[in-house]
Image (cartoon, grey):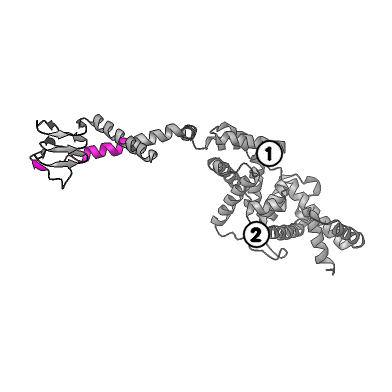
Amino acid sequence: MMMETKIKEYIKLVKKGDQAAFEEIVLFYQSKVFAICFRMIGNRHEAEDIAQEAFIRAYVNIHSFDNKRKFSTWLYRIATNLTIDRIRKKKPDFYLDAQVQGTEGLDLYAQIPADQALPEEEVESIEIQSYIQQEIMNLPAKYRSVIALRFVDELSLIEISEILEIPVGTVKTRIHRGREALRKRLRHV
Amino acid sequence: MIMKCDKQITDLMHEYLDGHITKKDEQTLRSHLQTCPACQEHFHELKRAISLVKANSDLRPSSSFTSQVMNNLPKERKRIGVQRWLRMHPLLTAAAIFFVMMFGGVYSAWDQDHQLSYPKGKNLVVEDDTVIVPEGVRVDGDLVVKNGNLKIDGEVEGNVVIINGDHLMASTGNISGEIKQVNEIFEWLWYHIKDISRSIFDMTSK
């Protein structure tokens, strides 16, 4: 709450032409914006690229931001829109949407035997992290965006619906299905 | 394996995990979980999946992230400065716009017509570049002659303005108002400004 009001002050300064004040905003939100983009696109380099562009766009369009609204909602909308555009422009993604409804069944990663996954004590390890991300990447893009927003920043369903500009009911359905899919994919980890 | 309770109960699990569950539904879920190992397992797996995804979420961008963003921001301070100045001085801005447009318009009017012009249909006679009000002719109202001389042998009931020309005196001529001769661009401008302000005051006084 304190931070939100501080951010609003920085935004006022940016609107007055104080470019340096924008640095505080970037520092505060960079990790979350990056993590959301990464969860959606699955590649560090691209995620960083998109996240940087999101901040630049936020800066350029700062005058269209209404200070009465929540800044993160506006910023995350820019970031998720950019990521969705990038996903659409990419080459046909043979593994992304291949297994849409059937969260079970065979796909590239389901073929990796469960007991090859690393033991639980190493949850923090890079391998596990990339394995989890690969499982997220097996979900359709529209599920990934909801999952990213829900689990990176613990956003409420209403906030997610505002960011993605979809009805709350749709957000709910996607979170439920996304959770079920992840449960099945990660139960052996 | 699949029990009848599955769908209804898993819905409750998700609502619980969303943080949107009624007290009554939460009670239903709790008492069911105590009696149903399959649902218990399911619920446990859901929570575990979430914690795995969350444990992973201390993803950090590279340390140069912020500086890269800052270096790629458009350099628009000057533009913002000008915009801000304009916004803070609305009166000066309006005055500046007014003068630019007025001088522009008046100058182009000055530049364009070098042709002799005078009011038609008033029995005036033209000889070379001289407009003559012949003897016995009476002009009612103001008389404006541009780019030519004016010789008044008759009468003018009003003001006379001669732009870019001379008033050739004739002893017999009679003018009831003033005579103004305008030859330089600044005088032309001054004449226009007076003209505009007079029409503004006329408008406001009506």
Earlier sequence position, callout 1 versus callout 2: 1
Q: Position of residue A59 (x, y in %)?
A: 55, 40
Residue at (68%, 52%) from the top-left corner? A160
Q: Find disc 2 in the rendering and name its residue.
A: A140
Q: Along the line of sight, which residue is nearer the eye, A74 or B32?
A: A74
- From mark 1 to mark 2, how far is it between C-alphas? 32 Å
Q: Position of residue A96 (x, y in %)?
A: 63, 59
Which span of residues is magenta-colored? B102-129
Q: Along the line of sight, which residue is nearer the eye, B163 or B26?
A: B163
Q: Amino acid at mark 1?
A: Glu
Residue B125 is a magenta residue? yes
Q: Amino acid at mark 2?
A: Pro
Residue A157 is a magenta residue? no
Q: Furthest-left residue in view? A: B127
Q: Which label was assigned to residue A4?
A: 1
**In the image, is residue B77 above or below residue B36?**
above
Q: Which label was assigned to residue B119?
A: none
Location of the N terminus of chain A (image quadrant): top right
